[in-house]
Each structure stands twice: as C-alpha cells, then as structure tokens.
Amino acid sequence: MIYRSKTMANLRNAALISLALVSAQAGAAVSEEEAAKLGKELTPMGAIKAGNESGEIPEWTGGYSTVPEGYRTGDPRPNPFADEEPLFSITASNMDEYADKLSEGQKLLLEKHSDTYRLDIYPTHRTASAPEWVYENTRKNATRAQSVLGGYAIENAYGGIPFPIPQTGAEVMWNHLLRWAGESVRYDNRINVVTASGSVSLASAVTNEMSFPYYFKDGSLDNFNGDFWHLYQVTTSPSFRAGETILIRDPLDQVNKGRQAWQYLVGQRRVRRAPNIAYDTPNSVNSGVDFFDEVSMFLGALDKYDWKIVEKKEMYIPYNMNEFYLHSEEEVLSPNHLNPDHMRWELHRVWVVEATLADGERHSIPRKRFYVDEDTWAAMLYDGWDAQGTLWHSGQGVPFLAYEFPGQIMYPFMVYDHVKGSYQASVFNESEVHYEKVDRYPEDNFTPAALSSRGVR
C-alpha cells in the first residue's frame, strides 16, 4: 500500500521533477559542535543530562540495567521501586496547583471523575537506557540524518535516535517512531473495552511478533533496506475471530513507498491487501474505540499534519510502571479510567508537539498534541480534538522498565473516548508473554506468503 493524498502526491511529483527541490526541503543535520554535546551536557540520546533546579528531576547517570536474579525475559518484571510510597497525590481539589504540569486529558479526567480519579506522584527515576551501540549510532545520526520531502521521509539514519537534537516537530515524532524498543520481540496482549457503565469486555487477545530492522545490531546504513518496523499479529481470542492476522511493514520513506499492510481473514481463507489499516480507520483489533494511527500514541505516516514544537517543559507522565503489570485485569481496569491505585506518575521533561491538519487533508481528529519523554523519545501522553474543538480522545502509555534490553519500553497503551465515556486498554497483565526479547525473525516471516502459509483455518 502507498499512502496517497494531495500533499503526498505533490511532494512525490516535485521530488521526481527536481532533485534540487528535494535538497531544499531537507532538514539540515546538526553541526559537529552541536553533536559533541551528546554524552556531555546531553545524554547519549539527546536529553538534558542535568536534573532540574528543584531537584525533583535527578541527573541522568546511565539509566537502569540491573537484571534481577533468576529473571527470564518475557516474564512479568519485578518492580525495582516496590518499597516507595507516593510523594503526594493530585486530585480535583488541588489540580490547579499543578495545572501547568498536566495534560488536558488528565485535567478532564480529574474534573469528570473527581471522586475516583487521582494521580499518585512518585520519586522520579531516570531509568531510560539503551545499548552502547545505539548510543554510537545516535551520535552518527546527529550529523548525517535528514528529514526530507516536507518531513514525511527521512534518510541517512540507522540504528539510533535519528534526531537527538531535533529542529522540528516532525523530527521529534520521527524520534518517537524510531525509539529504542529492541531488535526482535514477541508479546501477547489483551485489549479490553471498558464502557461508561463500567462493564469490561474482551475485544481481542493477540500475539505480536515484531522486528525492528532499523535496529539490527549487525546492520549498517549501507545495507539497510529502509523498513524500520515489521509486525505479524495473530488474533487468538475470541474464538470467532481466532486466526485473523495482520502484517505491516513501515518504511522511513513514507512518500515514495509508504506502509504495506495485508490481512488474513479466516472466513475468506485468503490474504488480501489492507490499505485501510492506517490513519483514522477505526482499529478493528480494538473494537474501533481508537484509530489505527493512535496505536502507542502515534504509529504511521506523518503526512496528514503540520507538526510544530510548542515547548519543552516539565510534566507528570506515567513511568516505570512494572508494578501495574503484576496485577490482574480486574484490579487495574476501573469504570471510567484505569485504577489509580496501580498507576505510577513521575515528573519528567517532555517535548510538547502540536499536530494540525495540513492543507487539503482530512482526518477525524484534526488537531493533536503529544507529550514526548526526553529520555526515551516515547510519546507518553496524547490529546486529540475534534473539528468542533472538543477534546475527544486522550491516549496514555503504560511504559515499563525492561532491564534486560535495557530500556524503558512504551508499546502497551490505552485510549479514552471522552465523548462516549469509554476507554480501551491494550496491555498484557494476564498474558503469558510480557514483551520478550527473542532471536531475530527471518525476513520471510513478514511477507504475504508467510501470512498465507501460516493461516490457521
């Protein structure tokens, strides 16, 4: 599939007509002098290394990579901060005091559910880390990576954060798309929908096999084929959907190549291209509560929007949520919102990025705002407004500390529908496999032929 829109088509034609125009559209890499800050006043990933003035945000000293004795990848991960108590709680009664550090979605939840919702604020731990070779590649990317074709494609990046010192909102979002999350992984997750009345229903249970070719340790810029993410997802429950499969391949060039997606439907017993698995198509895996480009806050092409960095600021965001995954679904899924008893919020610096609908484009959510953690480059929170300016959707990551990768991983997520009063939570509390590091999947695992041959019925 190729993402086709007026904006994309114009950019593609311009690129073919004039290489000079492409060069003019390219986002410049930073200077050697700027890049030299990485690993010094900046962390190897581009965050401010120092803590904040109040001391609430500590200095980054290398992250956290201590693997508990006896731990096996893919098992529920112990909470290394289990003995900590909240420093304080933010409720509807005191939220004005902390308003500048809260997203609009969190403010709305506090207002609407003043009797049940709160944010428990814990000490901040800057646990984010990555392998040394990721740091080395990030340093190289700083002076070679470029955003091109209006920011909707990038080139000369591999194996690390592409823009550790970003200049544009699109570059921040590319950092989110290309955040470190391992080389090849497997995890099972269950997507539950919680209605306004509090009833919980299982939308689907799925097994995910994912590869990140952009992060293959033995790869290089010279032999990289341009695909940064591969997904093979099989539905295992409910029984009438068991065997449904989705295959996605996402490239760095979202203009000339674009997402390629296929689907296997057991009733039809055939593989077909799935061009609608993108943008604001309701996410069928999640019963349509969210859209496909809201997965993990944002996943897909950037071309529907103009992107702008609003500011960099301190905010309370979910972080180090290992404890959350040690509880059952019944314990963590409450009416109207996740159970605050099992949530952990910390003060971190974030990049605030605004997305507004580009000229000539259409999307059900024409305005979005993302809150991107400086240490991981993961968007931990997201708000989306409808055409009337009403806050409609809010997303929230449920990140966890994966010491063995190492890294602070943000793939599980949930999305609130403020209009309907419902939400969906895509998590793995009761799954057998919790984000497991695996040997690299073969390339042909992510092909339509594999989709056809692995069909279960």
Image (cartoon, rainbow, N blue to C red):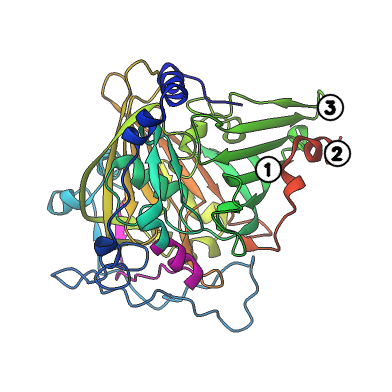
Mark closer to the chain start, 2 or 1: 1
Indicate the secondary structure of the residue bearing disc 1: strand
- x, y percentage for residue 248? 63, 38
Q: Which sits in the foreground, 348 or 440? A: 440
Residue 56 found in image quarter = bottom left
Q: Is 365 rendered above or below residue 395?
A: above
Residue interval drawn in magenta: 116-139
The three-letter code of the residue at mark 3 reads Arg
Q: Mark 1 points at which residue?
A: 233
Q: For mark 3, does the 10 Å Cα neighbourhood hold few (<14), some (14 to 19), or many (20 or more) residues?
A: some
Distance, label 2 to label 3, CA atoms, is: 11 Å
Real-space Cα separation, disc 2 to disc 1, in angstroms: 14 Å
Where on the picture, by quarter, is residue 415? top left
Between tags 2 and 3, which lies in front? Answer: 2
Residue 263, horizontal then vertical, whole percent: 71, 30
Residue marked by disc 3: 269
**Circle 2 sits in a helix, a strand or a loop, which is it?**
helix
Q: Residue at x 61, y 53 (%)?
A: 223
Which amino acid type corresponds to the residue marked 1 in the rendered image?
A: Gln
Residue 114 appears in view: no
Quadrant where the C terminus lies?
A: top right
Q: Which mark is residue 266?
A: none
Q: Please tell me whether mark 3 sits on a helix, a strand or a loop.
A: loop
| Mark before the other along the chain sequence, 3 or 1 | 1
Which mark is nearer the camera, 2 or 1? 2
Looking at the image, do the residues carrying marks 2 and 1 touch, with CB atoms under 8 Å apart?
Answer: no
Residue tagged by mark 2?
A: 453
Quarter-wise, where is residue 202 in the image? top right
